[in-house]
């Protein structure tokens, strides 16, 4: 997406006034619109949404202002075609200073998370002559993001250091776990299927009801163990 900027008639006069008076030009606000505003207009043809202004940056003699469009702040869906920049000199009136046309239209819908940052450059005046009015309410700057990220990282580091220095950090968790080698009483086994062949205990308590080892074979009984049951079958 490419932006083409042009001064309005009032904007060119304002820049000339600032140069003649050696005064600062203050960027007061930015707005998005769906029209094609003529340069001689004093207002945007179809202004639809305010943009958030971020602080300016310098590069040589140019001052660049970042204007952020958030679709969530739109009153309704619209086609974005241009961005207007408004300014004033000293205590004078605000005028439509510059227009930035998009080389392709963009659909803005309030139920989306679309966010677009436009970098709007001022080239007529010296960079130090350009001031920007910034509304801090609702504005998350890069510095705030860095500060929040740093605080979060420090909090995580403190938690990890505290965990590492706590010798009993895992004792409560391990206390709930059974050792790798352990047994269960018969009353705890109420359902399910053994995962392999399980052999019953060999003993001589023949009159006691218990789990027995059972063998099936066409041969005569041989070997075996106490309490084992052997069934011979014919084929």
Image: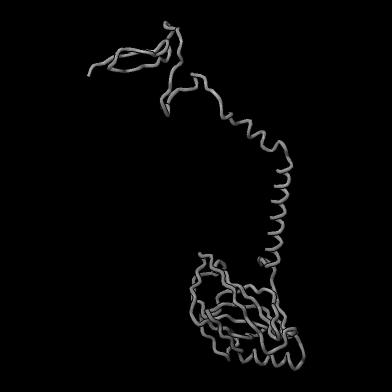
Residue 65 appears left or right of 180: right
* Residue 130, placed above or below residue 111: below
Q: Is residue 124 left or right of residue 225?
A: right
Q: How is the image coloured?
A: one colour
Residue 123 lies in what quarter of the image?
bottom right
In the rendered view, tell whether residue 134 sits above or below residue 144: below
Residue name at image x 64 percent, y 76 percent:
66
Which residue sits furthest left? 235
Position in image of residue 191 (x %, y %): 43, 25
Q: Position of residue 168 (x, y in %)?
A: 71, 36
In the rendered image, the residue lying farthest to the top is: 207
Res 128 quadrant in image:
bottom right
Q: Can residue 91 be seen from the camera position used here?
A: no
Left or right side of 87 for 190: left
Q: Can the viewer see residue 46 in this picture?
A: yes
Q: How many marks?
A: 0
Q: Quadrant of the C terminus?
A: top left
Front residue of 130/148: it is 148
Residue 201, position in %: x, y? 46, 15
Instruction: Residue 39: give x, y in percent of width and height.
Output: 57, 90
Picture quarter containing residue 141? bottom right
- Of residues 46 and 227, which is closer to you in this image? 227
């Amino acid at each position: 997406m490419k932006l083409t900027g042009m001064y309005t008639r009032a904007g060119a006069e304002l820049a000339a006034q600032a140069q003649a008076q050696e005064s600062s030009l203050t960027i007061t606000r930015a707005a998005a619109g769906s029209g094609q505003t003529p340069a001689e207009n004093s207002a945007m043809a179809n202004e639809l949404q305010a943009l958030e202004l971020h602080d300016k940056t310098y590069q040589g003699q140019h001052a660049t202002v970042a204007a952020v469009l958030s679709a969530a702040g739109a009153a309704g869906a619209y086609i974005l075609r241009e961005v207007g920049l408004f300014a004033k000199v000293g205590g004078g009136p605000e005028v439509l200073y510059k227009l930035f046309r998009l080389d392709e239209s963009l659909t803005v819908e309030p139920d989306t998370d679309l966010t677009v940052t436009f970098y709007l450059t001022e080239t007529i005046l010296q960079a130090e002559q350009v001031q920007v009015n910034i509304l801090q309410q609702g504005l998350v700057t890069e510095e705030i993001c860095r500060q929040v990220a740093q605080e979060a990282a420090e909090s995580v580091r403190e938690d990890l250091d505290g965990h590492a220095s706590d010798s009993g950090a895992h004792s409560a968790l391990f206390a709930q776990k059974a050792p790798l080698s352990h047994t269960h009483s018969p009353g705890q086994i109420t359902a399910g299927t053994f995962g392999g062949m399980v052999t019953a205990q060999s003993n001589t308590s023949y009159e006691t009801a218990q789990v027995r080892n059972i063998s099936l074979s066409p041969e005569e009984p041989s070997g075996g163990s106490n309490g084992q049951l052997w069934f011979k079958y014919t084929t």
